[in-house]
Image (cartoon, rainbow, N blue to C red):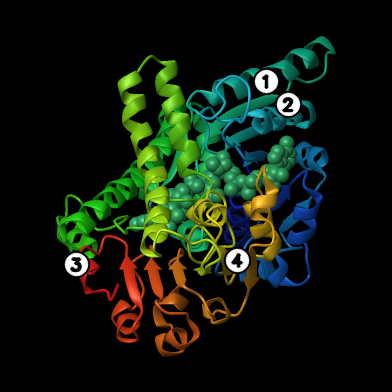
């Protein structure tokens, strides 16, 4: 099976960067990324590369090289399906908000709609690849939907279409997506059709070492993606649970993480403490895993993984309570500067960002927030801070692109994202700007706290139990 034309349904954080890298590495393949969101497609086609819908380091250069040559962005889903040899389904799979399984199960309506479109409009032999993160066994549903078009074609005595369904989950992380795609730890392909598997392997072999391309059965591949995310999130909840213990005992989380992570069996990745993991996937994927476990009657397994999400929620709540306590039990009317709103550095994505929960809690207590983020827009923050009782949150926060503006007359500053910029702030200027007693809350443990303290700023840094007694107040 020779792949000359690829269609990717979904021009989001995965579809866009992934197809850009495939286009860059496979100049002989034409790639059409399609989406029903017209604005998003217009943004991908924007002449000004600073206005692409997604910020990822290095992405703009690839778009510049490939767009209009072998990489195209379009809203014409049907036509681009009809000419494709291989179709990636890369649509969103968020947690269901209503109906059966609400709050835990994945909402598969966009995957279902994509499969139906493929079944109607594909022609000849087509490889259908699950790129979205999906509950184990979804490939069965996709195969069933695709079978329907074959039945109809047979009745109308047209040439039957032939579909091969593969699973090829994506492991990129935002902020490092291009590097992750170019140098993946592994590429995972699940399926039971050797020719289709070898055609998909052939694409990756253009730049990925063969030893890094793992093939498994469909269900192992689908499940491995959920489990990989669950393991990563579990490490963060583990280290965050220990931050509270460090604060209670006088231990220091960076020392503990270093000592523990130096054991090569444990390793030192994903041991950075923080305000709780965010991002569109960890929480939804674990909740989905919990739902699947319950479906199979594995309640103890479900409870085990649910604990990872519980600790994450607890960490966010714990931090907003500490801020309130340190500021003499009331933050009503006090100005608090927020450094970073995205869920991590080097992205404009705010989905499930701990900043949303923490800022909302502070606003509900009556604080006035001044928010800085180098990549997130005012409109995005406005939409994230909107509440059912909008009135409580209205007009009590401002947004600025001037980092020092947020410190003027502020009672406290909270570092919520691990941006490089926050590591080298001018604490002398900040101290003069702030109202006394002034507080710095470093939820990432990245700030030069010695300099801040030297300038008479009280510091709380996550998991730094050794700091607590050194403050003035
Ligand atoms: P996203 O919301 O950024 O993009 C999904 C896009 O699909 C949207 O633009 C939406 O309009 C489009 N879409 C939905 N239904 C469609 C349809 N029927 N036809 C055409 N377009 C349609 O989502 P994302 O972050 O790219 O995530 C996509 C999938 O990849 C999810 O399953 C996610 O769990 C998984 N994933 C995400 C990441 C990440 O870093 N964001 C990493 C690995 C895996
Ligand atoms: C994560 C996984 O790392 C990817 O492999 C996966 O493909 C992706 O989810 C997905 O399926 O969506 P992402 O959410 O983009 O990627 O970013 P991460 O680097 O994993 O960070 C997630 C959250 O955990 C962020 O809020 C980050 O600040 C936090 N984190 C990460 C910590 O608090 N400590 C750490 O040590 C690492």
Looking at the image, is mark 4 or mark 2 earlier in the sequence?
4
Task: Tell me, yes or no, if residue 302 can be seen here.
Answer: yes
Q: Circle 1: is it few (<14), some (14-19), or many (20+) Cα within 10 Å?
A: many
Q: Which residue is mark 4?
A: 59
Quote the CA–CA distance across marks 1 and 4: 35 Å
Residue 3 falls in which quadrant of the image? top right
Mark 4: secondary structure: helix
Residue at 75% across / 19% down in the picture?
A: 149
**How many angstroms separate mark 2 from mark 1 (CA)?**
6 Å
> Is 200 in front, or is 35?
35
Judge whether 241 appears above or below 403 on screen. above
In contact (CB < 8 Å): disc 2 and disc 1: yes
Please identify, in this view, whether the residue under mark 3 or under mark 2 is nearer the observer: 3
Residue lying farthest top? 155
Q: Looking at the rendering, in which quadrant would you find the C terminus?
A: bottom left
Q: Position of residue 81 (x, y in %)?
A: 75, 38
Whether residue 5 is visible to the viewer of this picture, yes or no, is: no
Q: Which residue is mark 1?
A: 145
Q: Nearer the viewer, residue 42 or 100?
A: 100
Q: Earlier in the sequence, mark 4 or mark 3?
A: 4
Query: Crowding at label 3, few (<14), some or many (≥20) Cα neighbours within 10 Å?
Result: some
Along the line of sight, which residue is nearer the eye, 55 or 180? Answer: 55
Q: Which mark is residue 466?
A: 3
């Amino acid at each position: 099976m020779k792949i000359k034309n690829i269609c990717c349904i979904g021009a989001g954080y995965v579809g866009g960067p992934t197809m850009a890298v495939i286009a860059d590495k496979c100049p002989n393949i034409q790639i059409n990324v399609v989406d029903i969101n017209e604005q998003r497609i217009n943004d991908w086609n924007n002449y000004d590369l600073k206005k692409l819908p997604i910020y990822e380091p290095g992405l703009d250069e690839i778009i510049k090289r490939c767009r209009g040559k072998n990489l195209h962005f379009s809203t014409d889903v049907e036509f681009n399906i009809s000419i494709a040899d291989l179709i990636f389904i890369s649509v969103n799979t968020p947690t269901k908000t209503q109906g059966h399984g609400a709050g835990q199960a994945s909402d598969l309506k966009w995957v279902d709609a994509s499969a139906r479109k493929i079944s109607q409009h594909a022609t000849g032999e087509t490889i259908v690849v699950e790129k979205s993160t999906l509950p184990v066994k979804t490939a069965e549903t996709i195969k069933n939907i695709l079978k329907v078009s074959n039945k109809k074609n047979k009745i109308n005595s047209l040439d039957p279409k032939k579909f091969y369904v593969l699973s090829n989950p994506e492991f990129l992380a935002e902020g490092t997506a291009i590097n992750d795609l170019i140098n993946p730890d592994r590429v995972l392909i699940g399926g039971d059709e050797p020719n289709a598997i070898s055609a998909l392997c052939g694409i990756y072999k253009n730049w990925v070492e063969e030893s890094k391309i793992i093939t498994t059965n469909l269900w192992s591949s689908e499940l491995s993606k959920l489990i990989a995310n669950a393991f990563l999130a579990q490490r963060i909840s583990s280290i965050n649970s220990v931050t509270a213990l460090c604060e209670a005992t006088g231990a220091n989380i960076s020392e503990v993480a270093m000592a523990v992570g130096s054991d090569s069996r444990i390793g030192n990745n994903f041991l950075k403490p923080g305000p709780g993991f965010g991002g569109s996937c960890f929480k939804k994927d674990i909740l989905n895993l919990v739902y699947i476990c319950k479906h199979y009657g594995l309640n103890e397994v479900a409870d085990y993984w649910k604990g990872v999400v519980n600790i994450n929620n607890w960490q966010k709540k714990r931090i907003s309570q500490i801020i309130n306590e340190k500021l003499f039990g009331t933050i009503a009317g006090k100005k608090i500067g927020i450094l970073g709103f995205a869920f991590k550095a080097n992205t404009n994505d705010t989905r499930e960002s701990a900043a949303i929960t923490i800022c909302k809690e502070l606003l509900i207590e009556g604080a006035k927030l001044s928010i800085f983020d180098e990549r997130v827009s005012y409109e995005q923050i406005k939409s994230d801070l909107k509440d059912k009782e909008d009135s409580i949150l209205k007009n009590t926060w401002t947004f600025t692109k001037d980092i020092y503006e947020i410190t003027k007359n502020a009672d406290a500053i909270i570092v919520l994202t691990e941006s490089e910029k926050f590591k080298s702030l001018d604490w002398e200027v900040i101290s003069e700007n702030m109202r006394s007693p002034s507080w710095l809350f470093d939820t990432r443990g990245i700030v030069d706290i010695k300099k801040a303290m030297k300038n008479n700023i009280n510091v709380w840094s996550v998991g730094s139990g050794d700091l607590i007694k050194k403050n003035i107040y």
